[in-house]
Each structure stands twice: as structure tokens, then as C-alpha cells.
Amino acid sequence: MSQKELASRINVSNSRISNWEQGLNRPDADVLADICRALNISPSELLDVHLCGEELSSQERKVIQAYRDNPDLQRAVNILLGLEKT
């Protein structure tokens, strides 16, 4: 698919597509879904993120679910993992 065709499908300029390809900037988050639909690919494939439920143990799935279900502990977990500073 050409830059022009992709630009037309997702309603952006050709130069914007060119800038993404050259690494000069990145598409906005709200455009990613449009890109995925235009290219008929999943967001995981577009972003090269391959983590599916089968790769996780049952314990890891429980931990992730508990993290999501308990916003009060999320900051503490983030601090422990070094993802957030105190």
C-alpha cells in the first residue's frame, strides 16, 4: 500500500505518513486504530507487542487481575517495581 493510499484511508496527509516512516515523529494514539483497520492488522502486530494470555501462568494472570481490581495498591506496586518514585 502506498503512503498516499494509507493517508487517504485514515484521513491524514501524505507527509504525515512519510514522517512516521522516517521516524521523525509518531502517530497519535487516536490514529492507531485507524491504521490497524486500514492495514487489517491487530494493534499488537502494529506495535510489535506479542504478549498473549497463553504466555502467562495462572499465578501471573491472578496478579495482573488483582492489580487491575485494586487501584489503592497500584501505586505501591509501581513503587516496588521501580516504575514510580516515592
Image (cartoon, grey):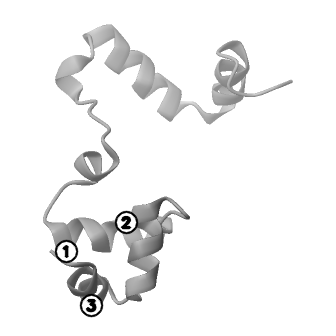
- The residue sitting at the right extreme is 86
- The answer to whether residue 33 is left or right of residue 23 is left
Q: Nearer the viewer, mark 2 or mark 3?
A: 3
Sequence-first tag of 1 and 2: 2
Q: Which residue is mark 2?
A: 32
**Left/right of residue 24 with respect to residue 52 in the rendered view:** right
Q: Quadrant of the N terminus?
A: bottom left
What residue lies at 41% left-to-right and 27% top-to-bottom? 65
How far is the residue under mark 3 from the one under mark 1? 10 Å
Q: Secondary structure at mark 3?
A: helix
Residue 73 place in picture, x, y as percent: 66, 24
Which amino acid is tagged 2?
Answer: Leu
State how far apart marks 2 and 3 are (Cα): 15 Å
The residue tagged 1 is 38
Q: Which residue in the protein does label 3 denote?
A: 8
Of residues 69 and 33, the one nearer the viewer is 33
Q: Position of residue 9 (x, y in %)?
A: 24, 86
Pair 3/1: label in front: 3
Residue 33 is left or right of residue 73, and the answer is: left
Q: Is residue 60 above or below residue 7?
A: above
Q: Secondary structure at mark 2?
A: helix
Residue in front for this viewpoint, 59 or 80: 80
Residue type pointed to by label 3: Ser
Any mark on residue 61, and which? none
Q: Residue at x 55, y 64 (%)?
A: 25
> Would you call the spot at circle 3 few (<14 residues within 10 Å), some (14-19), or many (20 or more)?
few
**x 45%, y 62%: residue:** 22
**Residue flagged by tag 1: what amino acid is it?**
Ala
